[in-house]
Amino acid sequence: MPSSVCIRSISHLVRDRAAHTSIASRCLFAAPQSAGFSTSAARYALPSKKKTGTVAAPKRGVKSLNVKKGRKGVQVDTAKRPAQGERRALRKRIVLSNNNALEVPYLTDLEKTSALSKKNQGQVKGLPEEVVDSLRAVEAFKPTQGWSLFRRPATLIRKETVQLAALLKVAEGHVNSTEQAVEGREDGEAVDGAKEVAEVTAEEAVAVAVAEEGPKKTIRRVIVGEKMSGKSSLLLQGLALAFVRGWVVINLPDAQDIVNAHTAYAPLPESEPTQYTQDIYTANLLSQILKANKGFFSNTTPITTQPELGVPLPANTTLEQLVNIGINNPDISWPVFVALWAELTLPGRPPIMLGIDGLSHIMRNSEYFSADVKPIHAHDLTLIRHFIDHLSGKSSLPNGGMVLAAISKSNSPTSAALDFSISVAEARQARSGNLPTWNLYTKVDQRVMDVLKDIEVIKVGGLSKAEARALIEYYAASGMLRAKVDEPFVTEKWSLAGMGNVGELERATVRLRV
């Protein structure tokens, strides 16, 4: 057969099979083209991975967060949220003891009879337990201070502390001409009232002032100095001395908490210009005042009646019960504070210590806004206005006392008027003939200038080598410093600390072990 015919026959055969494929597939007896059932694939397949809730540990140095994706790929944080106020409590947590530290055998407590003596200079004195409780109540301790390193709270009596103690004597009216002659200069030379203040010691100067101006007075001071020089610690020492001497202490621990708009406020009715009260903050302040001065408040009966409170008072009520009314009813906390202040300033009451830390926060506009959306100046808040009136000298303390403010350098907003007033006060106290002049191109806050126009300052500098040695020896006796304390070692640490900066000295000895 020719090849062309063979090829044509084969092509017809292929077309016939393609045409009858559907018929062949419907035939029951047709041979299957592929296997109908097989278990080989499932038998020899790899086992599937089980889903578990555990997550592998992260690699070293890699931070991981347990997150879970939502429906649309959004990551949802499944970690446990901290309770309300837990972070703030942890940030402000104060530890005042360390059981691993050694007990210092030579440590003695401050006593009422000798707390104001200048012989304490250069010594480390312990704080009595009742004073520690009162200082904790008014939040005088700071988390950044090294209280947790030692067995119990103690403080170094430095030259600025002695100066502060001398001012407390003036406020109490216990310095007279006889005491002035006894506590004169070390060489025994009598102090003449006509001498310049720069030529005598601080204690002699205040003694002369008492002899001229009267037995009791209101002392107004602002503590200034470099960063970590111990300004807040000096404020704490002033509060501690006031507690030891039996004063009534009212402390505003952080001025930032008053002006940062974190607490409720409302305009004070019938006030011109408009003043603003902070009921919740005032109630908390009353609670602190009561805890710190409970011994005096629980044994003192109010003399005057307070009809403006709107709450009937029992016949034999005490100041403690009066304060509890403001604590339990924040809506009338400010009238209760006014009533309490009227009782504390009656004749025969003890001296009063007013303290505040972070003064620069209240020397500018606050974060609050008025009804017409204008910033409220910090001096228009009732608590700040009460403190400012006494700091400026507009109001005085009839039974004597002290208004003590500290400027924090670690958290200090800019206030040109405050900086200028402090520089003028320092130049005036140094008897410098060239007083600073105001920069005309800078906007002036006249309200701040009026408050600080005649203020006096206590400048906190570095420790002397003798004071630094006493502090380092206390560190060694507590077991926090394992080194031989001798003159070369003290000189080295004193130099590394910037000529006696107390914060740097603590960092160079017991914190970083430089």
Image (cartoon, grey):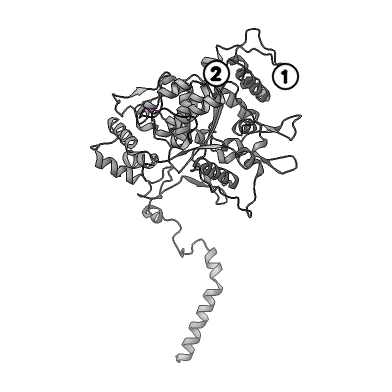
188 is within the stretch colored magenta = yes
Mark number displayed over residue 308:
1
Q: Quadrant of the N terminus?
A: bottom left
Q: Nearer the viewer, residue 93 or 462?
A: 462
Q: Find residue 219 and report its image quarter.
A: top right
Is 121 included in the stretch rendered in magenta?
no
Q: Position of residue 392 (x, y in %)?
A: 61, 34
Q: Amino acid at mark 2?
A: Pro
**Residue 109 located left or right of residue 307:** left
Residue 208: x %, y % from top left: 50, 28
Q: Residues within 10 Å of mark 1 (few under 14, many from 20)?
A: few
- Residue 87 in the image: x percent, y percent? 50, 36
Instruction: Give the SS element for disc 2.
Output: loop
Residue count near mark 2 (Cα–Cα under 10 Å), binned few <14, some 14–19, many ≥20: some
Q: Which residue is mark 2?
A: 350
Magenta span of residues: 187-195
| Circle nearer the N terminus (2, 1) | 1
Tell me the element at label 1. helix
Q: Residue furthest bottom?
A: 2
Residue drawn 58% across the image and 46% down it: 415
Where in the figure is residue 409, as x and y percent of width and height? 49, 43
Q: Quadrant of residue 112?
A: top left
| Residue ID at (46%, 27%) | 166
